[in-house]
Amino acid sequence: MEPLLRFKKIKDKQNILCDEFFHEASKIDIISFNYNNEGSALCRCDGKLRKLSKNRINKILFGVELARLDTFIKGIYQPDTKSKDLKRKNGKVQFRMEELKSLDKYSVGNLAKKIHKELLQQEIGHISYFQEQKINPAKKSKSKKSAPSPAEQAYFGNKNTHVFHLRTCNNYNSSTCTAVFNSLKEAKKAGFRPCKLCSSE
């Protein structure tokens, strides 16, 4: 079944805590709206078929008020800040993403403070984390393949491993691949090394 809509994360807004807040998947194909009477949808996220709640659909399609995301981030390092998007158990924040589960409380707190500071510099009151991708249902042509766009030629650096990947690499979808470089030279100059699987020199 062909997806009705496809959404992909806006790279310059991507970070691990926003991934947790909006959705951990890097791209979302909405297969069917109104999956049940509550308005849920069936979607495919990185190849996995899932149900999305109405609340999550609204976040993906329309974004949220910046104040809501701000409260979520602040609540991570300020326990007295109440956020309806933040779950706690015995005083400890319950994350869904494995990358966050593996971090200690001190590291997550520092990360939240850093991202919160960046959010405070936003001049808009609303934030969208996904952008719709146009799906071209045109017939496949046997004509000469067009040259890749600059975005397809870009390199994406993993800030944890300092390895950069091409968009075609399986490791490109990592939530920590947030550094974007326009050339091999630019990536190396920033101290990143090429992925042995996808990057040819």
Image (cartoon, helix red, strand yellow):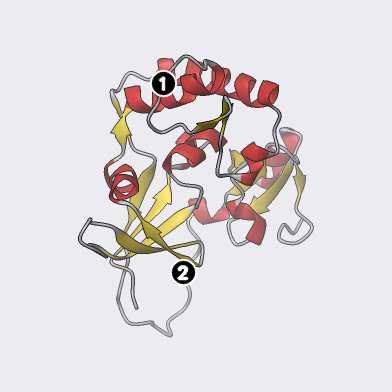
Q: CA–CA distance between discs 2 and 1?
A: 51 Å
Q: Quadrant of residue 104?
A: top right
Camera-nearest label, 2 or 1 = 1
Q: Secondary structure at mark 1?
A: loop
Q: Quadrant of residue 196?
A: bottom right
Residue at image coords 72%, 37%: 160
Check the image and report above or below for 141 versus 111. below
Amino acid tagged 1 = Lys
At 66% from the left and 55% from the top, the residue drawn is 171
Q: Around disc 1, counting alpha carbons within 10 Å, would you say few (fewer than 14), some (14 to 19), or many (20 or more)?
A: some
Against 104, residue 134 (above or below) is below
- State the residue position of label 2: 146
Residue bearing mark 1: 82
Packing grade of label 2 (10 A; few <14, some 14-19, many >=20) is: few
Instruction: Name which residue type carries label 2.
Output: Ser
109 sits to left or right of 150: right
- Residue 6 is left or right of residue 81, and the answer is left
Q: Position of residue 90 (x, y in %)?
A: 58, 28
